[in-house]
Amino acid sequence: MARALSVPQKRSPAVKPAQRVSPKKVTTRTAKQRQDAKTPRLRRVTSLPGVTTKMRRIVVVGTLLAGLVIAFMLVVVIFQTRIAERQLGIDKVESQISIERQRYDALRLERSSLRNPERLVAEATAMGMVPGQGTDFTAVDPMTMALVLVSTGGVDPKILAISHDPFENYGAVKATVGDRP
């Protein structure tokens, strides 16, 4: 048969009241003393092992160069965005110009059809008008004309000097429009 081994168990020593640790005495400290007790002393590291000043310079120059390249790329993106915005504005104005040219052409066509002599004759005939038999010119005596002017208070010379010719800008418009109707 197997024998049973008995292992003695460790007993915790009984703590006697006389052996108890008395609590630490509380002392008052200033905030500066507490701060100094918590923060460790800092020391300056002059160089990392295996890192030379040449390597540091390369890293600094590389970082600055990368920053400049990124800044340049941002400027290019902003510039391209501005160009695209301006181009959209130009396209909008060009489309408005095209629409207005088409409107102008339609109005010119309508005007020419309204001023067509055949249409005017047809409209006049529909209203009951008849063509004149002939044309007679009557000479007016200058004295009679002067009497009429005096009796009506005269005509301001500024009004007589202003005369508006409806075809005054025809040449400029035709040069702009070209061969289009």
Image (cartoon, grey):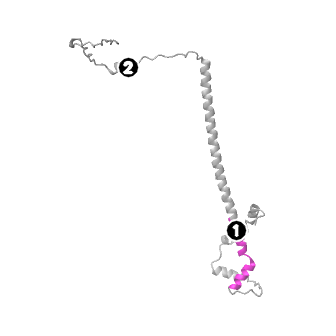
The answer to whether 92 is drawn above or below residue 33 in the figure is: below
Instruction: Compare residues 133 and 136 and report the one nearer the observer.
Output: 133
Residue 155: quarter of image: bottom right
Residue 106 lies in the magenta-colored region: yes
Mark 2 vs mark 1, foreground winner is: 2
Q: What range of the chain is rendered magenta?
A: 103-126
- Please name the residue shown 62% across and 32% down the image: 68
Q: Residues within 10 Å of mark 2 (few under 14, many from 20)?
A: few
Residue 106 numbered mark, or none = 1
Q: Is residue 50 left or right of residue 122?
A: left
Residue 154: quarter of image: bottom right
Which label's residue is closer to the chain start, 2 or 1? 2
* Amino acid of disc 1: Ala
Residue 17: quarter of image: top left
Circle count: 2
Q: Quadrant of the N terminus?
A: top left
Residue 91 numbered mark, or none = none
- Please name the residue shown 64% across and 52% down the image: 89
